[in-house]
Image (cartoon, helix red, strand yellow):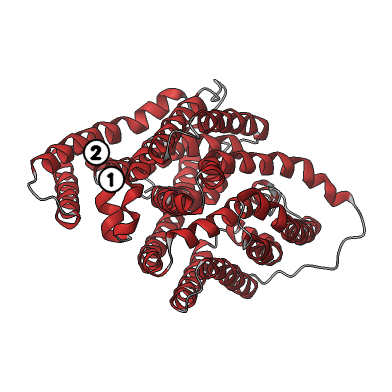
Amino acid sequence: MPQTDARLDSSLTAAARSSRSILGTQAFRLAVRVCGTVTLARLISPLDYGIFGMAATVHGLAYVFQDFGLATVTLRKADLTEADRNALFWLNLVLGGMLTAAVATMGFVVAAFFREPSLRVLLPVMGITFLINGGHTQLRAQLAREHRFTDLNHIEIGAFTASTATAIVVAWMGGGAWALATMMLIAEMAIAVGVWRKQAWRPAPFPRSLEFLAFLPVGARLSANDGLRYVQRNIDQFVVGRWLGAGALGVYGRAAQVTSLPIVYLADPLANLAVSTLRHLSGSTDGTRVFWRRMVNDLAWVTLPTAVIFACVPKELLEVLLGARWASGAGVLLGLSVGITLLPVQMACGWLFLATGSSRRLLASSFVNSTVVVVTCALMRNAGMGKLAMGVGLANAACAALSIAFIRPSDPVTPSDVFSALARPLIATAALAVVMLVALNLCGASSALPRLCLGGAVSCAWVGLIWLIWPRARAEWREHFLWARR
């Protein structure tokens, strides 16, 4: 028993070290993204953002199929042979080339659908990212499998910084939507160079046997799940672009980008670590429960207060950060913020299903969730941006609750673990929302900056007060970043 406990503590300690490295990188990336977004919002018009957003909705849907779930196969497979690695690499490269060709041929169709001629050229150029990605996906997944997250983080920091700087230069030269497309291309190229430098393994020639196609059925289910998740996250922007036009999509998309920050810079980067660690802990029910509850709790302590800030000062955030011409997206930011309140539950349930090999259950859960959001968008497509966003936010919150229903009695975690992990973050955040709304209503200032500063001051005071008067919450914060304490 002591040996088992030692192995459990060792696994949790390794997860803590990796998560701190990942979150440190994401904090840096977030700072670069905020600076880049603030600058680009003043150099690129809402119309150009909307044109890029039209292309991005199609490109993003193809992007989720870029590795056909094969990178996740690399992370999950207990024994990965040299032949497996080689087969997975060539499969990814071939699929990347096929996606590049498919997206290029879709340019004319997409341009006709959105009634925007510039998409005929913009989308094919953006499609080149799939070929580049296919050349480094497996090497990158192998670095993650080896828990070389520090190397991966350094690569991402360099790529992100270089691509953002390039986009700002192109935008300053009047590139418009092309500045954003350039950012995508530079990022993929920089990641490819960095991964090939850090990963010593090199692929052998294309395998003559077709046995490697056995990976495709599992990959297909994982890829279908990613596609459904993408639809759930982005169908509202597709609806806005098609029925309200590029200008409206530009405004809606910037607000949606703000609310996606917890997903892009917290939940998604932790996914590989979560799945890999849960797989290593699969033999220990206690270890899996401890790790999973901490993941939900850690995410909740970040996403819930963030949602409150988005909901209480949406206009002030957009006006101060992006400029006055983006303030019309305040209703969108308010509505979508509702959807990230239960984000930790939905993400962590997906990681659990993935790590336990329940790809069919994962797919079923994603199908139900995406159906709820699609139906909501269909019913509210003519309601206006603000009401559509509120409907989508409520639908996403409902989806998180629905994900709990897919947890089985045989799983190492139970619905009670969900409520236990969320209890204190929910109580504390509800108090923050009440205090912030009261403070803002009593505030005599009407301009954006003083009100935003007040909201920030209330948030800081809230953090300090909880630390001082709530020992149990303080204990959870001390265990933050998955400290290996039981």
**Residue 42 tag number:** none
Mark 1 belongs to which amino acid? Trp
Residue that badge 1 annotates: 477
Residue at 92% in and 55% down: 209
Determine whether, in the image, residue 66 is placed left or right of residue 444.
Answer: right
Mark 2 belongs to which amino acid? Ala
* Residue placed most toward the observer, 102 or 291: 102
Q: Total of numbered circles in the picture?
A: 2
Residue 194: percent from the left, percent from the top? Answer: 59, 73
**Residue 473 tag number:** 2
Residue 257: percent from the left, percent from the top? Answer: 43, 52
Residue 336 vs 21, above or below: the answer is above
Q: Residues within 10 Å of mark 1 (few under 14, many from 20)?
A: some
Quarter location, residue 198: bottom right
Q: Residues within 10 Å of mark 2 (few under 14, many from 20)?
A: some
Residue at 24% in and 33% down: 430
Determine whether, in the image, residue 118 is placed left or right of residue 274.
Answer: right
Q: Name the residue furthest top.
A: 409
Residue 108 vs 381, above or below: the answer is below
Residue 131: percent from the left, percent from the top? Answer: 71, 64
Quarter location, residue 362: top right
Residue at 64% in and 39% down: 225
